[in-house]
Amino acid sequence: MTRHFLQLSDLSAAEAASVISRAQQLKASRDTSYRPFVGKTLAMIFAKNSTRTRVSFEAGMARFGGHALFLHSGVTQLGRDEPIADTARVLSRMCDAIMIRNDSQADQAELAAYSRVPVINGLSELHHPCQLLADMQTWVEHRGDAAGKTAAWIGDGNNVCHSMIQAATLFGFKLRIAAPDGYLPDAGIVAIAGDAVSLCGSAAEAVAGVDLVATDTWTSMGQEAETAKRLKAFDGYQVDDALMQLAKPDALFMHCLPAHRGEEVTANVIDGAQSVVWDEAENRLWAQMALLEFLLAA
Ligand code: CP
Ligand code: NVA
């Protein structure tokens, strides 16, 4: 049966662990002679901007001997209201996998329902599962197994936060979330995670003694009209040196990027010794190569 990757919980814990360990292997070997995807094409539909997601999928397909097709949705017939189901049926007869970044988890599910080939969520309004594969690879690479450890999410309870919640269940770590009222993560996603996730009253409470501190922009793509309101709402949720000092001395700092220095994080923290954001960005490449290998073999 065709496997899709629309949210992190589409993988079992064992599958997720094996994707991460394969990603580490691929990174360690950097073997450009291994080309399992010769003749294969990944269609990449983007309704939103991207640097990392586009480049990592494109470079990953190239390393594997395949091809990636960049489709800005606005210049395809999707931009002229061709149904998503018809698009799925057509693309999946010509391509071997489809990646989509848009603002609708529901449309992504419909795309998958009508696709003969794996569909990958490259970010939606609800999830960013590829990001968390790279984040988990980065955590393991720097500190070993995440099981039994604790992370803090500071700021917006957004798409990346939702995927981190699912990562906590899948990889066995605890996640403490500090977000202002009105910006909490989806209650249903939090509830499914049970005691893996707790909501904290302040950023300081969330980071106390943790192994990892993560944040993201306060204004996600599509929310630009709310920027001024959000800047006010997130006052007190900046990750700065004082906050990092409350975490374990060897705590890592992560951010999916793009970052806004002086807003959700200070330059000192993101450009400092505890930050692993560049490894995190690089690992999008290796983690997604491992994911593509897994989905195309399934
Ligand atoms: N982190 C991430 O998905 O980056 P892009 O928006 O540049 O793809
Ligand atoms: N939460 C951000 C992530 C960008 C990679 C957004 O949705 O814009």
Image (cartoon, helix red, strand yellow):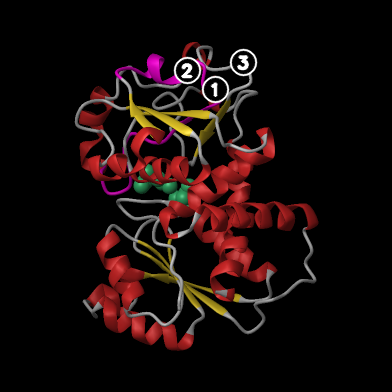
Q: Residues within 10 Å of mark 2 (few under 14, many from 20)?
A: some
Q: Amino acid at mark 3?
A: Pro
Q: Which residues are magenta?
A: 201-223
Describe the element under mark 2 as helix, strand or loop: loop
As rendered, which of 219 and 160 lies closer to the eye?
160
**Contact between labelled residues 1 and 2, with CB atoms less than 8 Å apart:** yes
Q: Is residue 53 magenta?
A: no
Disc number lying in front (3 or 2): 3
Residue under numbered circle 2:
240
Of the numbered discs 3 and 2, the one sitting upstream in the chain is: 2
Q: Is residue 131 left or right of residue 177?
A: right
Q: Is residue 198 above or below residue 88?
A: above
Q: Quadrant of residue 84?
A: bottom left
Q: Residue at x 32, y 41 (%)?
A: 158
User: Where does the image place residue 127, in percent across and percent down from the top left?
Assistant: 36, 51
Q: Amino acid at mark 2?
A: Asp
Of the numbered discs 2 and 1, the one sitting upstream in the chain is: 2
Q: Is residue 27 left or right of residue 168?
A: right
Residue under numbered circle 1:
269
Q: Is residue 133 visible?
A: yes
Residue 249: mark in rendering: 3
As rendered, which of 224 and 146 lies closer to the eye?
146
Q: Main secondary structure of the magenta part?
A: loop
